[in-house]
Image (tube, helix red, strand yellow):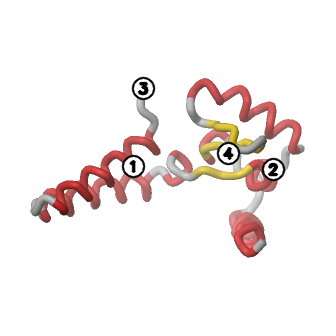
C-alpha cells in the first residue's frame, strides 16, 4: 500500500515528466492536485525529527522512539543514521504551533 506522502511525491514526479514532454495543461492539473492534497493533510506528508516529535507531543524522547518503532512497519517512521524520522500524523500535537515553529527555526539554523 502506498502512503499519502509517496502518492503526492509520485504525482509531482508525473507532473514534471508531463511538463517535460509538452503536456503543460495536464502537468498543471497534476501539480495542483498534489498541492491540494498537501494543503488538506499536511501532517500526512510532513516528516519530523525525534526532537520535533518530542516538542510536539510533550513526551519524553524515550516514548517518542518507542512510538516510532511501533510505526516502522507501516512506513510512517524510518530510522536514518541512528535517529528516527516520522510522519507528523502519528504524533499528537499537544504543544502550540508557535512553539513548534520557533523550535524548527532553531533546528534549521544549527
What's the mark number on residue 1? 3
Residue 37 in the image: x percent, y percent? 38, 51
Of labels 2 and 3, the one closer to you:
3
Quick check: 1 above or below 14?
A: above
Cα distance in 3D space between marks 1 and 2: 26 Å
State the SS at label 2: helix
Mark 1 to mark 4 CA distance (whole Å): 17 Å
Which mark sits nearer the N-terminus, 4 or 3?
Answer: 3
Mark nearer the N terminus (3 vs 1): 3
Specify whether 7 is left or right of 69. left
Q: Which of marks 4 and 2 is in front?
A: 4
Q: In the picture, residue 102 is in which quadrant? A: bottom right
Residue depicted at 34% across the width and 45% down the height: 10
In the image, which is nearer the foreground, mark 1 or mark 2?
1
Could you give the CA–CA distance between mark 3 and mark 1, rounded to whole angstroms?
15 Å
Residue beneath the point at 17% across and 56% down: 18
| Nearer to the camera, 22 or 44 | 22
Cα–Cα span, label 2 and label 3? 28 Å
The N terminus, quarter of image: top left
Name the residue tied to disc 2.
Answer: 54
Name the residue tied to disc 1: 9
Q: Earlier in the sequence, mark 1 or mark 4?
A: 1
Residue with the mark numbered 4: 85
Query: CB atoms at circles 4 and 2 under 8 Å apart?
Result: no
Amino acid at each position: 500500500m502506498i502512503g499519502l506522502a509517496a502518492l503526492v511525491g509520485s504525482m509531482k514526479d508525473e507532473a514534471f515528466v508531463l511538463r517535460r514532454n509538452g503536456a503543460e495543461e495536464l502537468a498543471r492539473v497534476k501539480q495542483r492536485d498534489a498541492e491540494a492534497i498537501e494543503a488538506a493533510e499536511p501532517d500526512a506528508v510532513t516528516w519530523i525529527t525525534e526532537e520535533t516529535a518530542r516538542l510536539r507531543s510533550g513526551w519524553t524522547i524515550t516514548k517518542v522512539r518507542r512510538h516510532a518503532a511501533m510505526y516502522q512497519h507501516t512506513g510512517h517512521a524510518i530510522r536514518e543514521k541512528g535517529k528516527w524520522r516520522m510522519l507528523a500524523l502519528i504524533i499528537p500535537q499537544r504543544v502550540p504551533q508557535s512553539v513548534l515553529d520557533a523550535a524548527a527555526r532553531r533546528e534549521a539554523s544549527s
